[in-house]
Amino acid sequence: MLLWLLLLILTPGREQSGVALKAVLLLDPPWSTAFKGERVALICRGISHSPAQGDTYWYRNEKLLKIKYNKIQITESGNYQCKTRGSSLSDAVHVGFSPDWLILQASHPVFEGDNVILRCQGKDDKNTHQKVYYKDGKQLPNSYNLDNITVNSVSRDNSKYHCTATCKRFYMINFKETSKHLNIQVQELFLHPVLRASSSTPIEGSPMTLTCETQLSPQRPNIQLQFSFFRDSQTLGSGWSRSPKLQIPAMWTEDSGSYWCEVETVTHSIKKRSLRSQIRVQRVPVSNVNLEIRPTGGQLIEGENMVLICSVAQGSGTVTFSWHKEGRVRSLGRKSQRSLLAELHVLTVKESDAGKYYCAADNVHGPILSTWIRVTVRTLLSPSVPVSHPILTFRAPRAHAVVGDLLELHCESLRGSPPILYRFYHEDVTLGNSSAPSGGGASFNLSLTAEHSGNYSCDADNGLGAQHSHGVSLRVTVPVSRPVLTLRAPGAQAVVGDLLELHCESLRGSFPILYWFYHEDDTLGNSSAHSGGGASFNLSLTTEHSGNYSCEADNGLGAQHSKVVTLNVTGTSRSRTGLTTVGVTGLVLSILGLAAAAALLHYARARTKLEGLSATGTSSHSPSECQEASSSRFSRIDPQEPTHSKPLAPMELEPMYSNVNPGDSNLIYSQIWSIQHTKENSANCPTMHQEHEELTVLYSELKKTHPDDSAGEASSRHRAHENDEENYENVPRVLLASDHWPLTQSGPQETACTSFFSVLSNHTSSISPDSASYEAGLQGM
C-alpha cells in the first residue's frame, strides 16, 4: 500500500553540500485525520529510503518523546516530527483525532501540483449517506453522494475544505452532520530559488556565472525542472533551459542592473521566482598611457609614412584614443574601441610634420596623457644644425623633492641635428651623460638624499659646439625624525606652583618644524621652530598636571610622535610648605609671646619712621607708587613664558613672615616688607631694583571681622583708627629659598617704599574689610 511512498532517492549533489537531508515521516493509514479511539502508525525513513537503523528520535509539539523505534503507534492529536542517525529533523505532520460523528480526511503526503484524495467518513459509515464536499464554503462540482473525490493540482494556499452527510441513528432518525474544516498539508515540491553570481561587482570585460539554486524534494526525485534568467525585464540567454547555470562571456558597464531567475516544472504546474540581486560592473580607469612612433625613434625622411601607436597598460570598456601635435588646437585623429591599443597613420610626412607629439586615452574617468615625443623630418640634402641652448627640467613624484624620491633630470635642445650627447652636473661636478641618437632630449635619474640639494645644470653637444643650460636649484626636504620630549622643572621633584618647561626636539628634519604638546592625549598647544634646537611650552603646575606627556613633530612630510613621559606633581607647593610651618610657629608665639611681639612692633615702627621719612617728615615714595610697581612687575609674568630672573646674591637675610590664622581665633596676621637701599637719591620705587638691598620684614596682627556682623565691622574700623599699635602682632617666619624676591640695586642708602602683601589661605574675605585701615596704619609708621 505504501510502496509508492518509499521510492525515495537523494537529489544529485545534495550529499556533497555538507547539509544532512531531512528525514521523512509517513502515516499508516495515510490519512491526516482519524476518529478518536483509533490508532495511526508513524514511520520514520532516513536518507537510505529504508527504515531507520539505530535509534530514532520522535517529537510531539517540539517535545522529545521517550520512544526510539522507527515505527510508533499514536492516539493523540499533535504535530509530529522524527530524526534518524545521519538525517536532520523531518517536516512537521499534523495528525488529528476527532470525537465528531463526521470527519473529512486528506491523503498524506501531498506536494505542490499533486492530486489529493478527500474522503468524507462517518463514524458509522454504513448508515452515512448523501455526502457533499465544499471548498471555502462553496460546493465542489460533481461531488454529491460520493465516498471520496480527487482535487487536482493543489497549491500551498489557505483553502478550507469540509463535507456534509446524512447519518441515520438508532436505525430510524436521520441527522445532517457537518465535518470540521480541514487545511490540506501541502509540502513544497522544491524550495524557492536563490540567484548566485560569481561576483556582485565584476570587472568590465571579465566573465561571470549565474546560478539559480533550488532543492527538489527527495520524495519527488523524478520531477523535471527548467530555469530562466533575467536582467531587469529582459530575458538572458536562450530562455528556458534544463541547466541551473548561465555563463556570460564578458560583462560591460551596460550590463549592470537587477538580476533574478525563475524555476518551474516542465509541466508548468509550479513556478517560483527568486529575489532580485543588484550587480554593478566596475570599470578600470586607463593608466600608463604610452606613445610609440614608427619608424622607431621618430626620425623620418621626407616622404615616408609615420605610424603613431597609443597604448594603455590598464583600462576596461570602450577607450577613446586621440593624437595631438604641439602648436595645433585640434587633434590629429580620434578612435573609440574596446581595446588597449590604437594606431594613427600619417602618410607622406613633410618637413612641417616635425615637432612634438603626444596621445591621450579616456574611458569616462578623464583623459590620461602620454609623454611628449619629438619627431624629426629631414630632407636628403638638409645641412647639419648646431644644438641650441638646452633646457633642464626636474621630474619628481611630488611638488617638493623628498629624501628617497626618484628624481629625473631631463635635458633637451629644441634645435640641433642628431645624434646629441647630454651631460648632467651637480655643483659643477659631472653626474653622468646620456645620448639621443634621433634627437630630442635625454634623462638622468637620481635617488635623492639630503646631500643632493644644490644647483644643477646640463649641456648638449652634437659635434658642432656644446651649449650649456641655465642652472636650476633643488632643495631636498628631509622628513622629521622621532622627537624627544624633555621635562625641565626648577627642582628634582615637580611641585605645585613650579614653572615646568616641556621641550620637544627632532634631531633630523627640514625646517620649519611644527611641534605639538599633549597631556593625556589632550592638546596643550604648539610652537614652531624655524631653526635647530626644538621648541618649548611652559606650564604653571597644579595637581591636575600629573600624568603622561608627549609631543609631536611635523614638517609636512608626516608627523612623528615622541615616547610618553610621566610627570608626578606633588600636591604642596614650595611656598605653601613654608606657610604651614610659619603658621604653626606664629600660633605658638601669639600664645606665649604677645608682649614680646608688641615690643618688636614698636621697635620696627620706630626704625621705619627714622629711615623712611625725608627731612621734611614725608615719605620719599608713596605706598601707592610702590604697590603699583610691585603689582605691575608680577602681572607681567606669563605662566606660559619661562622666568629668567636671577636669584638674590648671597647675603644674610632677616626673618620673613607669612599670614597665619591661629585656628578659630579672631586674629589674622599679615606680613609687611620694608626694603632699604644703599643709594640716597632713587627716582623710582626701590622694589623695582635688585642686588645688595637690606630687607626688613615686620609682621602684625589684624582683628578678624565676620562678614555678617556689620556692627562688628564698624567697630573694628573704629578701633583700628583709635589705636593702631594694639591691633597688630609680629609673627616671625623662616625665609625659604623659593620666597626670594627679585630686587634691583638702587644706589646709596635710602629708605624703601613699604609694600603690603596679604597672603591668606582661605581667609581673604575676612581680612579685606580692614585692609584700608591697615594700610593707613602702615603709612603712619
Image (tube, rainbow, N blue to C red):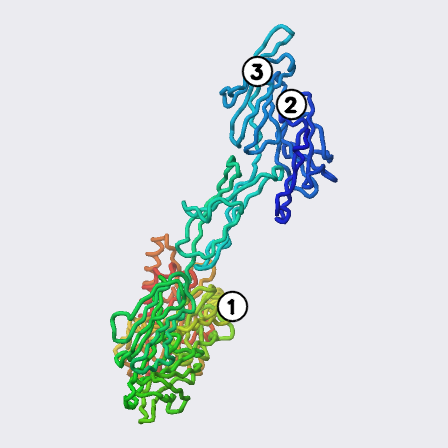
Callout in the foreground (2, 1):
2
**Where does the image place residue 404, in percent across and percent down from the top left?**
45, 78
SS at badge 1: loop
* Earlier sequence position, callout 2 versus callout 1: 2
Q: Is the N terminus in the top left, top right, bottom left or bottom right quadrant?
A: top right
* Earlier sequence position, callout 1 versus callout 3: 3
SS at badge 2: strand
Type of the residue with mark 3 = Asn
Identify whether 559 is placed above or below 18: below
Please give the name of the residue rendered at 57% of the width and 13% of the height, measured from the top-left corner: 130
**Residues at discs 3 and 2 in contact (Cβ within 8 Å):** no
Query: Can residue 372 be seen by looking at this rendering?
Result: yes
SS at badge 3: loop
**Where does the image place residue 763, in percent across and percent down from the top left?**
41, 60
Type of the residue with mark 2 = Ala
Badge 2 density bin: few <14, some 14–19, many ≥20, Cα 10 Å = many
Callout in the foreground (3, 2):
3
Q: On the rendered structure, is 750 left or right of 565? A: left
Q: On the rendered structure, is 359 left or right of 564? A: left
- Which residue in the structure is indicated by mark 3? 145
- Which residue in the structure is indicated by mark 1? 568
Q: Which mark, residue 34?
A: 2
* Earlier sequence position, callout 3 versus callout 2: 2
Of residues 252 and 677, the one nearer the viewer is: 252
Identify whether 210 is placed above or below 559: above
Please give the name of the residue rendered at 36% of the width and 53% of the height, measured from the top-left corner: 709
Callout in the foreground (1, 3):
3
Q: CA distance from mark 3 to mark 2?
A: 21 Å
**Residues at discs 2 and 1 in contact (Cβ within 8 Å):** no
Of residues 199 and 216, the one nearer the viewer is: 216
